[in-house]
Amino acid sequence: MKSRILGIKFFVIITISVLSIRLFSIQIMDTDYQEIANRNVIQKGIEYPYRGLIFDRHGKLLLYNDPVFDLMITPKNVDLSDSLLIKKLLFITQREFDQAYLKATSFSRHLPSIFYKQLSNEKFAAFQDIMRDLEGFNINSRTTRGYAEIGLANILGYVGEVTQNQLNMDTTGYYKSGDNIGITGIEKTYERSIRGLRGVKYRNVDVQGINMGSFENGAYDTLPQPGQNLVLTIEGALQKYAERLMEGKIGSLVAIDPSSGEILALVSAPSYDPSLFSGRAFSQNFAKIQKDSLKPLFNRPLQAMYPPGSMFKTIQALVALEQDQVKADEIITVNGQLIGDHAPPGRYDMERAITKSSNNYFFKVFRRVIQQGKDPSPFIDSRIGYNKWRDYVLQFGFGKMLDIDLPNEEAGFVPSLESYDKIYGENRWKFSNIYSLSIGQGELLVTPLQMANLGVILANRGYYFTPHLVRKVGTENLDFSQKKSIAIDSEHFESVLNGMQALVSVPGSRAYIPDLIFCGKTSTVENPQGLDHSGFMGFAPRDNPKIAISVYVENAGWGARAALSTASLVIEKYLNGSVKKKWLENYVLKGDFQDAKPE
């Protein structure tokens, strides 16, 4: 037994000795293996795809790709004695070098990561000349966004480096640290379509990280697939003109084609230059713009919420007519004492009430809608009437998102029964508590997009399409043809439209456009924080309408000044191709809307 154990021990010792000698020979004595290893380090590189290009409806390029170059580092191969040269070429301090090196090391000592983003052309050229002398560094190319126009920022949005939180939420596993992703606007909504697919390229590199050629002649490489191009619904020339009119103002403008729901122009003022977010100074520029008290990153057409004011009287009229609570030709006499009013006392039918915007007329009409005598209790009766009224209002797209293809859309607010129960107590409120709704004030909140969509509904006499900004992705035309109908008879629209037409068809007025019949309604939107806001909603022409529009100009006073003047110019520009009312254009560009008359 002892001899067998001794034999096993001897065999193990001999085996270990042979293996040790062989390893010593391979690693120390025979340099052939070292040379082969040095020649055959395989490095996996990411081939970034081009993001899809973006064009306006006429094929004009709006957003493209600019090449940029990142300096990559593989920490285990770096000779830190080269740091002096690196610092000199990049114009960075020792502390900045150490921070970048530590970040790369914490990611991986063996895998390449970004050491310095977006080298300038001069720095890129300098590194190209010395790359063979730098161990562990190499250049990786990718693209950043380039903008053909300064405008459209709140439509196009911008891209930025994917955050750790986004990486954690990415169930597909597509994104890696250092990748770019759409942050806002179209860039975010259509991210999956326009980002493309990454490719992979394997290459042989020596110990200095110098490219020695492709691995296996590229047999395992995959080519990047560029993202799909987008064609927007935006009318580029109209967008540019609308942005010019809104310069120096706070507010928004939304123009929609009623026949399709395609958005022709969407302006948020003030805005920003999107190119500021495409370079190395992204963080610095973003912080500066984010601190701007006028909030240029706030997309007002979708996110700003205001009481609709007198523009909402068009809905009050339609709901009352549909419920047979008033006739279009019925005369209602008002004395101006029920609610504050700028319309004179007198006799009103529906058309004149819309034209003159009589608060007292719509106070009486709304009271009929809410108090229909369905229950002897005025509290329960008001609940029944209000709930029926609210159901109609929701059909118009208020109190909910319209699902535009942009992020961060707000729904506005149409109070529910529960909302008023919380304020007053259940069955403890009635018409006298909510009558301010009759003139579009009170708790109602709407977005400019919703008001432009109201213009679409009026233009179409009772239906709309989902408002959208993209008509084509790649070669595919998107389908937004499904109508969303309102349960109101089309015949009820005529008296309302007659009143809207009379409002804007006075020769010599701001709104008047010769040989063009269009319809509109103004609002002077109450603002408890300062001067009232100026609002307008309408469409043109009355027959076979081509454009519906809403305009809000904050702190500009009467709706018949800033908002109506701006909308009239945009309508004229779109339908006639040019503007003849230069006196009105100068008035809007000047922006002094507290003057009684345009200069």
Image (tube, helix red, strand yellow):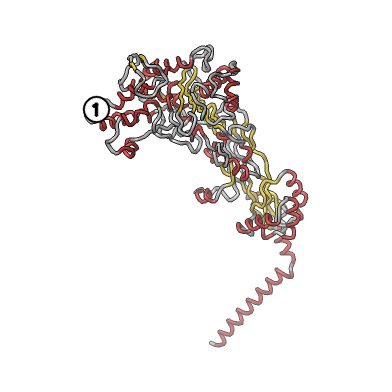
Identify the residue at image location x=45%, y=14%. Answer: 502
Of all residues shown, which one is farthest toward the left? 376
* Residue drawn 52% across the image and 17% down it: 511
Q: Between residues 398 and 233, which one lies in front from this camera angle?
A: 398
Q: Which of 327 and 82 is in front in this view?
A: 327
- Residue in the image at 76% along x and 48% along y: 126
Picture quadrant where residue 277 is located: top right
Q: Position of residue 4 (x, y in %)?
A: 56, 85
Residue name at image x 38 percent, y 22 percent: 359
Name above or below for residue 478 compared with residue 504. below
Which quadrant of the view contains residue 491? Answer: top left
Whether residue 515 is visible? yes
The residue nearer to you, when weighing 428 against 28, is 428
Tell which of 338 and 496 is nearer to you. Answer: 338
Which residue ends up furthest to the right in the rendered image? Answer: 129
Q: Label 1: few (<14), some or many (≥20) within 10 Å?
A: some
Local secondary structure at mark 1: loop
From the top left corner, tell me how far across and down residue 101 is, in percent.
66, 57
Q: In this view, does 289 lie above or below 539?
A: below
Work out whether residue 42 can be spotted. no
Q: In this view, does 463 lie to the left or right of 189?
A: left
Amino acid of disc 1: Lys
In which quadrant is the C terminus drawn? top right
Residue 475 on image: x %, y %: 56, 32
Q: Position of residue 57 (x, y in %)?
A: 57, 27
Residue 358 vs 413, above or below: the answer is above
Q: How many labels does the image show?
A: 1
Q: Residue most toward the bottom? A: 2
**Residue placed under numbered mark 1 in the picture:** 374
